[in-house]
Amino acid sequence: MRFIPGTTTDDRFALGHHAFGLNPHHIMMGTVWMRKTREARIPSFNAYRKHFGMKPYDNFLDMAGGDNEIASELEGLYGDVDGVEFVTGLLVEGHLDGGLVAPTLAEVTGSFIYKTMMSSPLASPLWRRPSTFGGESGLDVIKEATLENLFCQNMKKCPKISFTVPASG
């Protein structure tokens, strides 16, 4: 991948107003995050999509999941869809069919999360004992945990949680 500098130097980077539901603290953290990625010369959002075998976006409207307001702001800030920075793309990319995360974020982080879970000693039956989790009550929390509870306890709304495995071929 190669670095493609965005055409904007505006630290709002399509996120700095309350229309996206962010409070001032989130905006400040996003600004710091954006500056750090620029200093590190992180490749563009589309460059990451290409790297992970995904089709790059060819227009702002598709990138923003059909949201005209976000697409318009992106176009005003970047001018070229290939100039949209990685962080901005992750924040504005539309979710597919009510998905919990945007497709690029799922692709970029999915294998890492899976490998981390599978290599964690906490996933091993040898570690599944009361002393690992602070006693019997801690172990009971682990035994009763479900993916649905994990999502529902960390989201404003609790949608129907389901997973599917794509057919091969």
Image (spheres, rainbow, N blue to C red):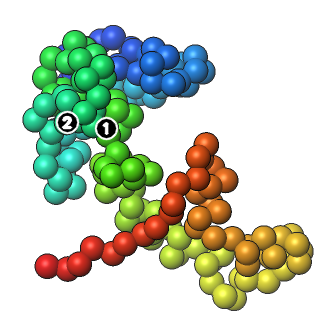
Outermost residue to the bottom? 126
The residue that appears at 16% across and 57% down in the rendered structure is 53
Give the labeled residue for mark 2: 62
Q: In which quarter of the image is the N terminus?
A: top left
Please rate how many residues cluster around mark 2, counting C-alpha atoms within 10 Å: few if below 14, some from 14 to 19, many from 20.
Answer: some
At label 1, the amino acid type is Glu
The residue that appears at 29% across and 28% down in the rendered structure is 67
Give the labeled residue for mark 1: 93
Please say if 106 is above or below 35.
below
Please say if 46 is above or below 124.
above
Q: Position of residue 55 (x, y in %)?
A: 13, 49
Which disc, if any, is residue 78?
Answer: none
Q: Quadrant of the C terminus?
A: bottom left
Q: Where is residue 12 in the image (x, y as percent from the top left)?
A: 39, 15
Res. 162 in view:
yes
Outermost residue to the left? 58
At label 2, the amino acid type is Asp
Depth check: give the residue in front, 29 or 62. 62
The residue that appears at 34% across and 32% down in the rendered structure is 92
- Dot 2 or dot 1: first in sequence order is 2
From the viewer's perspective, is 77 left or right of 129? left
Task: Say which element carries label 2.
Answer: helix
The residue that appears at 45% across and 24% down in the rendered structure is 20
C-alpha gap between disc 2 and disc 1: 8 Å
Please say if 70 is above or below 164.
above
Depth check: give the residue in front, 123 or 169. 169
Please rate how many residues cluster around mark 1, counting C-alpha atoms within 10 Å: few if below 14, some from 14 to 19, many from 20.
Answer: many
From the viewer's perspective, is 149 left or right of 75? right
Please say if 163 is above or below 125.
above
From the viewer's perspective, is 19 left or right of 126? left
From the viewer's perspective, is 83 left or right of 136? left
Q: Position of residue 72 (x, y in %)?
A: 23, 17
